[in-house]
Amino acid sequence: MKVPATIRTYCPKCNTHTQHTVSLYKKGKERSLAIGARRHQRELKGYGGQKYPIQREKAKTTERKTLILKCQVCGFQVFRGGIRLKKLEIVR
């Protein structure tokens, strides 16, 4: 799916329709000291192995892509998420 680089849409901070730049959301690096990561490491320690099944085969053919819309007036970012696509192309 082709998406334009700029979209005119509603900005909740400006309370009006403004131009927004479109970018693709990327997941950041996971923190190694977060409570979930520490708990998981503690579960893996010692005998017994993995605590939940590791998914070996990919079940779905598409991924959910999340778009980040950044207002060009105030800089407020709106996440527009949950579109299932095989390929996303931002057209400049």
Image (cartoon, helix red, strand yellow):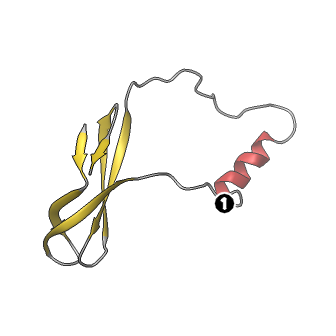
Residue drawn at the location 15% of the way across and 66% of the way down: 10
Residue drawn at the location 27% of the way across and 62% of the way down: 21
* Residue denoted by label 1: 34
Residue that sits furthest to the top in the current view: 57
Badge 1 element: loop
- Residue 20 location, x and y as percent? 23, 64
Quadrant where the image shows the N terminus: top left
Task: Name the residue nearer the viewer: 41 or 10.
Answer: 10
- Residue 89 location, x and y as percent? 31, 41
- Residue 60 location, x and y as percent? 41, 25
Quarter-wise, where is residue 5 in the image? Answer: bottom left
Q: Is residue 54 above or below residue 38?
A: above
Residue that sits furthest to the right in the current view: 46
Is 55 on the left-hand or right-hand side of 68?
Answer: right
Is 92 on the left-hand or right-hand side of 56?
Answer: left
Badge 1 crowding class, 10 Å Cα cut-off, few under 14, some 14 to 19, many 20 or more, is few
Residue drawn at the location 67% of the way across and 59% of the way down: 35
- Residue 81 location, x and y as percent? 31, 50
Name the amino acid type tagged 1: Ala
